[in-house]
Image (cartoon, coloured by chain):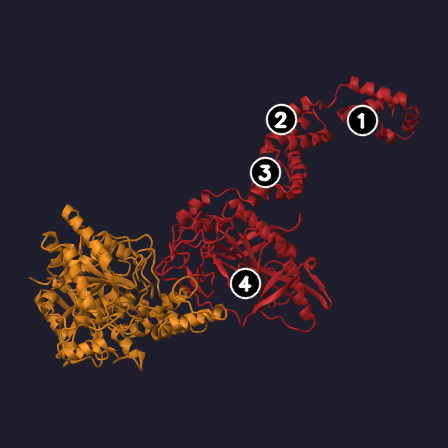
Chain colours: A red, B orange
Amino acid sequence: MNTHAKPSKLIKGATGDWEIVVGMEIHAQVSSNSKLFSGASTEFGGDPNAHVSLVDAAMPGMLPVINRECVAQAIRTGLGLKAQINTRSVFDRKNYFYPDLPQGYQISQYKSPIVGEGEVIVDVTATEQITVGVERLHLEQDAGKSLHDQSPTESFVDLNRSGVALMEIVSRPDIRSADEARAYVTKLRTILRYLGTCDGDMEKGSLRADVNVSVRRPGEPLGTRCEIKNVNSIRFIGQAVEVEARRQIGILEDGGKINQETRLFDPGKGETRSMRSKEEAHDYRYFPDPDLLPLEFEQSWVDELASHLPELPDAKKARFMKDYGLASYDAGVLVMERASADYYEKVAKGRDAKAAANWVINELFGRLNKEGKSIETSPVSADQLGGIVDLISEGVISGKIAKDLFEIVWSEGGDPRALVEQRGMKQVTDTGAIEAAVDAIIAANPDKVAQAQAKPTMLGWFVGQVMKQTGGKANPQAVNDVLKSKLGI
Amino acid sequence: MTHPTDLTLADAREALKSKKISAVELTRAHVDAIEKARGLNAYVAETPEQALAMAAASDAKLAKGEAGPLEGIPLGIKDLYATRGVHTQACSHILDNFKPDYESTVTSQLWRDGAVMLGKLNMDEFAMGSSNETSYYGPVASPWLPPNWTEDKARAALKGDKRGLLVPGGSSGGSASAVAARLCLGATASDTGGSIRQPAAFTGTVGIKPTYGRCSRWGMVAFASSLDQAGPIARTVRDCAIMLRSMAGHDPKDTTSVDAPVPDYEKAIGASIRGKKIGIPKEYRIDGMPAEIDRLWQQGIAWLKAAGAEIVEISLPHTKTALPAYYIVAPAEASSNLARYDGVRYGLRVPGRDISDMYEQTRAKGFGKEVRRRIMIGTYVLSAGYYDAYYVRAQKIRTLIKRDFENVYAQGVDAILTPATPSAAFGIGEKGSADPVEMYLNDVFTVTVNMAGLPGIAVPAGYTADGLPLGLQLIGRPFEEESLFSIAEVIEQAAGRVTLPKPWWN
């Protein structure tokens, strides 16, 4: 753990500086067709209790059977976090009563998780990188859902999620700010999506965070932490850290002390509220689940899964920087989503890689964000965008015209080269035509000619006029050259 | 001719094959016997229509020569096996009206092999008990008359609270009583700490608890998952062998079931035991053991020696720690296994002010006293601060008990001979009301076997001076049930078939 506080991260309180310390437990829903211990579907949506097996409903005499694919997904994730894979782990029962927990216990892993220590490298800003330690990853069952808004006198239970596999990924308390917290979850989400082990869809609850926050004076031991349960968006995670740290600092600066407790973040009010104190905490009575033998597998299976892992974001970013000469920030933006990186590589193939990066990042991503579209639903394909880049590098169109062309392809589709032909968007490089236009403008504006000769920066006005007359298609370099020689500047 | 209900399972099988009797006739005879024996309270649900329909189907198969190994054999099923559409409550109030729409693996294998279901058998609630007195449906009476009781006195007691009549043992008391009273040719039972072997010994019947993992637990209401195992109770060793073959087998739905072929256990009957090494554990000679139990044990040793077995004294040093350790492990697992009975989805629900109140009311009213006691013990031994002192230590003891047996088997011992119970059957209402430990002591010779996951069989070997049956227990190597059948049959032959009581209860 980093014990040297970074001055830039400190929060100024009324009585001096404070350091925020954050550790996170991320619950990531495993991408799999069926649940962790039953054959029921994991499909999202569906009528209440449509995806419930006898096991999920905890009927008498039912037994759990581990789903091999969920185990494989946990191993892949562990490998993606550069973590220790434990070829022997144990499932335990976490006992508590709740209507959406039909067994009266959650099957989880307590003392012997399937994945041990690992790490996540996180870019916090264009220039700042931190490493967040992963303490462990374990597999466990999700609970069902209690519905309190269906009847004035009763609550209902939907068990569709009951028994769905979750990976709980526990970080070390290596995070020092709300920005770092957001960046950590963003990066973790990217890795999970690359691996295909969790879709990372926070709106559907596929990724949820329990955020542990404490504050301390720089250099002092860890303070008492509060756990903020079930924060379900990256933005809220940042807000929750910020708000909770401020709350704790306020209490400490007033001479109070922090009670270890579980809290809830209310995004509407922008505050955290106490849920239960340490004294009210459940005694979960963990013990090894006697229905399940210890989970054991061969190292050769791990090796086999490792050999089929996709290139992960860190490696891809390094390759983009090396092979395409991209800046760290640009490479980082491109690898955030595997689909974006794939798109970029298709555009960059055989072309000016930096120009391709500019087009993908500035034009395409900008436009996609504006319209709330994803790369998968982009109206402009990688081939089309590549075609536009080709037309620029061949000098067929100017950068400015290229933006117009991009607009046409975005809204109407079509082959960029054919569109340039059909719509007469070709750049004019024929000096005869340019000279004619220049002559006409010089003849019509003798006063401006004099001004330009006195002050050469006036040249811009002439360039603008030529472009206007040629409908923007004149090659800017050629226009400059002709103007300079005709005006004698 | 012998009355159809007095046939052994093996003899009934031959009679059906040779068409001396039809499956419907055989089933009808049992249905009638059950009706007349309602006073014993062995069955908690009778399924005569289903039984007769299954028997008719069996007759058709028998006629076509497509008979399964148990074709047309009427059986009773312990109430903890899930049977589709039929009463399945583990004799608890909390599972009121629960009728599953699934069938346990063990019973579905019995039906696959042609067996006929007569109904569901009484048991201690959630299999927690050694006398069948904890059942929500009331105690079961043994068909054996208490010493010096007249039939009239016994009949009168049957109509009342049954006090003084003999317990059939537990938790599979309904199974043992029904088999001994000829209310079925065999019964399924289950054994967590002795629940097959002790009732078999109390009723002069044979019961085997196979190796842990031999039978699937899928569809059996769980008591203590790491100890529970299905097994049969029947009137002869051979009948148990026939039943176990159908009940056993690997089940992908139970990951603790073992993928090993199921032998034809019946072939082990009559095999020579010459040269088999039989261990006699000195730690089983406990203080205060009745002289007649010791005499029975010595008699068993003499019979096996006479059959050519080699008798060796052995030591199982951790025996005395087994019972206390068992009463930590089993309640711990039970406290968690029984958490699902919460009034939310099925069974009894007692309304409350809020969810916690509903849980409390439902579980307070739904569970009987012994079940509540064990849930509390289990919750206590798993709770923070006590886990290491109780649960962890009990698990360590369990490992040591297992090692005791492994050491003995490594020395070439084939099986271990012990008494099955420390006494003969006692009276209903006689034991455990003041001190539950008095009742728990019934399992002193049987729990070690569950803790070690080994197979154990109880076989009748003689009588008390008062004429009550007594049993001996044989403990085997893992998955060597065949040896147990061979050796048990030697004892059965030497002791002579038990003369079961005449039906005074009719």
**Which element carries disc 2, helix, strand or loop?**
loop
Q: Taking B441 as reference, is A23 left or right?
A: right
Q: Using the image as rendered, state which of residue A104 and residue B305 is in the foreground.
A: A104
Q: Identify the residue position indicated by label 4 in the image.
A: A152
Image mark 2: chain = A
Q: Which amino acid, mark 2?
A: Asp
Q: Taking B37 as reference, is B440 left or right?
A: right
Image mark 4: chain = A
Q: Identify the residue position indicated by label 1 in the image.
A: A468
Measure how far apart labels 1 and 4 are at the Cα level: 70 Å
Q: Which amino acid, mark 4?
A: Pro
| Chain-order first, disc 1 or disc 2 | 2
| Chain-order first, disc 4 or disc 3 | 4
Discs 4, 3: same chain: yes
Name the disc covering residue A377, or none: 3
Q: Position of residue B111 (x, y in %)?
A: 24, 54
The image shows residue A459, relative to residue B15, as above or below, that is: above
Whether residue A475 is visible, yes or no, is yes
Question: Is label 3 or label 1 in front?
Answer: 3
| Chain-order first, disc 1 or disc 4 | 4
The image shows residue B171, relative to residue A181, as above or below, that is: below
**Which element carries disc 4, helix, strand or loop?**
loop
Please report contact status of discs 4 and 3: CB closer than 8 Å, yes or no.
Answer: no
Name the disc covering residue A415, or none: 2
